[in-house]
Image: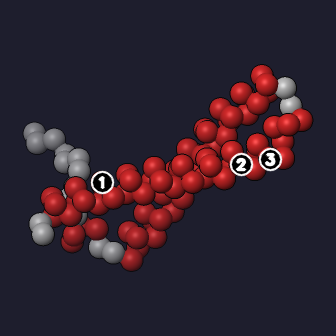
Amino acid sequence: MNKKANTLLFVLGATIANVIVMMAIFLVLFVVFGKFVAPHLSPQANQIIMLVLFIGAIVLTYVIYHRVIGYLSKKIDMDKYFDPIFRPRKK
């Protein structure tokens, strides 16, 4: 495979993995919140906390993704296997 195909497959795989991790984190937070906290709060407070849980899942997913990519970039020579997504503009 060439570098462009490797890059495309990596981006697709990383995106799918990122979405799955985000859904899993949100589901865990949702179940914990629904089981322990939600019955004791008003519906308006539950709506706000659900939004906070969703945003928290996105942030936590970003942190996990950032650390995994940092670890992979230390272990794997990215320039050897992947084509740059953004190239500098030619003058």
The residue labelled by disc 3 is 35
- Identify residue type, mark 3: Lys
Residue at the far bottom in the pictured view: 75
Residue 25: assigned label: none
Q: Quadrant of the C terminus?
A: top left
Q: Is residue 84 left or right of residue 62?
A: left
Q: Is residue 72 visible?
A: yes
- Residue at image coords 40%, 70%: 72
Residue that mark 1 sits on: 12
Q: Can you say which quadrant of the picture contains the N terminus?
A: bottom left
Q: CA distance from mark 1 to mark 3?
A: 35 Å
**Residue depicted at 11% across the width and 42% down the height:** 90
Mark 1, other Cα within 10 Å: few <14 / some 14–19 / many ≥20: few
Pointers 2 and 3 in contact (C-beta within 8 Å): yes
Reading the image, the residue beneath label 2 is 31
Relative to the observer, which residue lies in front, 5 or 32?
32
Tell me where residue 20 appears, x and y as whole percent.
47, 54
Q: Is residue 32 left or right of residue 86?
A: right
